[in-house]
Amino acid sequence: MSNPYQEALGQTLIERTFRERIVLVGVTLGGHNDDETEEGLDELSLLIDTAGADEVARLTQRRDVPDPATYIGKGKVDELREVCLALDADTVVFDNELSPAQQYNLEKQLGRTALDRTAVILDIFAQNAHTLEGKAQVELAMLRYRLPRLRRGAKAGLSQQGGGIGTRGPGETRLEVDRRRIMRRIEKLERDLKGLGRTRETQRKGRSRSGLANVAIVGYTNAGKSTLLNALTQAGVLAENRLFATLDPTTRRLSLPGGEPVLVSDTVGFIRALPHSLVESFKSTLEVASAADMLVHVVDASAVHPENQMTAVREVLAEIGADSVPEFIVFNKADLRDDFGAALVDDVAGSVAVSALQKEGIDVFLRTLADRMRAISRVTELFVPYERGDIIAAVHREGEVVSTEDAGEGLRIRARLSEASAGRLREFVTGQAVGGTMVGDERP
Ligand SMILES: Nc1nc2c(ncn2[C@@H]2O[C@H](COP(=O)(O)OP(=O)(O)OP(=O)(O)O)[C@@H](O)[C@H]2O)c(=O)[nH]1
Ligand SMILES: [Mg+2]
């Protein structure tokens, strides 16, 4: 009997005892296309590799809507079981999110562990959490993910003792205990994290007393955020070709050319459809971004679709309330592009291209960052006649209004505006101030 998977089987047999063998499943739902599914599976494959397991096959299906019981159709479940048997796969991982019931039914019908992307991401986080806070955050996320999946006797037939994606993590020994104890544990973790959050708050207050502005480096996982911080400050932060290498924020002081020093923080990476339980649990860590004065958004210029990664990052930023912080786009890994990222930079106003690894483009990056920092600390004063409601609205929409004051036939407005906005509104601009002193043509 010839079977299409035998070759793959022969090649990877040696690793069997060390690395889990995984079959990936991707479903193209109505309104999506097969390319998106393949890209999703490529990323899932990287996630699985990072978690310490191997992809041995992938299966795809097109469906208008998921099957409520098993996500894929019955015939596909049979095919999946055959593939698992032929390849001696331990686990199947869906790129799509499985409901607890679908996960349970699949495991019963396949006779092996069925997981989704969220479980793999949680597993990687569990491996990478090192600090007290990081560990508590990951445990909390895992418990929140597992709680609705708890079932009497559900342990039987799942992964063998220890090892294996989805079985790792600080919460493991508690998997068998009842819901109540898990709920109590969740409450305790939430309390502990609140305490740790307060400590962080105090530290931040201490810093803001120092008067330094905060810059947070954000971006898709593996975009090169830690490498950039290292290139800027010799921070010695772990930078690795792994997803989610950084879980704990590191902050360093950085001197900007011709400007004030700022505090720069490296942050946890984002990914498409970052599990909600993780975003919830990492709120305090992610506050580094929402409380920042400026976001340096690092984009991997060598990615197949950098714009998709930017969109995914902005979605998470919105979820944590950081979407109102000014954003400075930096295309990294420009060394991997023929044009050193010029085409990308042309498309995104105000962006720059760098190679954090080869320390190229860092000068321009620093100068641009200094400019942007000056722009956000600069207050523009405008006089707008009352009949120009459109302009008054534009100032509110495009900038941060500091004060408004009735001035006879119009409104005197002081606002933080980008250079571009100030330029567009220049016929109404009466002066600009950096740190309180107005310059320009003073009005009576
Ligand atoms: N070619 C090239 N590789 C880079 C560059 N910057 C970073 N890398 C590589 O990209 C990989 C990820 O870098 P990190 O700095 O760990 O990325 P990160 O964004 O901090 O990733 P996480 O913390 O995992 O979210 C590492 O293997 C780096 O060596 C660059 O400018 N050019
Ligand atoms: Mg990192």
Image: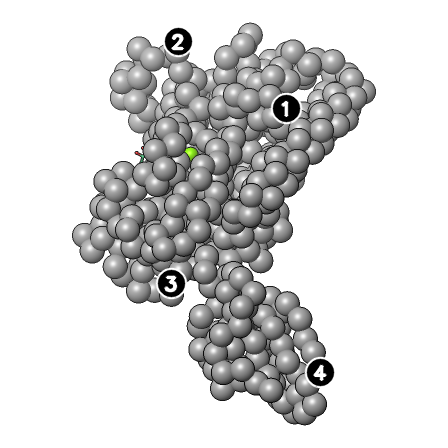
Disc 3 designates what residue?
350
Question: Which label was assigned to residue 136?
Answer: 1
Disc 2 designates what residue?
17
Q: Nearer the viewer, mark 2 or mark 1?
A: 1
**Residue 319 coordinates in the image, percent (x, y):** 61, 49
Q: Give residue 170's quadrant in the image.
A: top right
How many marks on residues? 4
Question: Could you say whether the residue bearing mark 1 is in a helix, strand or loop?
Answer: helix
Q: Give residue 410's quadrant in the image.
A: bottom right
Q: Residue at x 48, y 40 (%)?
A: 265
Q: CA distance from mark 3 to mark 2?
A: 51 Å
Q: Please say if 324 is above or below 183.
A: below
Mark 2 CB lies closer than 8 A to ligand 1: no
Q: Amino acid at mark 4?
A: Asp
- Earlier residue among tags 3 and 2: 2
Q: CA distance from mark 4 to mark 3?
A: 34 Å
Residue 285 showing in the rendered view: yes
Q: Quadrant of the N terminus?
A: top left
Question: Could you say whether the residue bearing mark 2 is in a helix, strand or loop?
Answer: loop
Q: Amino acid at mark 2?
A: Thr
Q: Residue at x 48, y 33 (%)?
A: 250
**Residue 252 coordinates in the image, percent (x, y):** 45, 37
Q: Residue at x 51, y 61 (%)?
A: 376
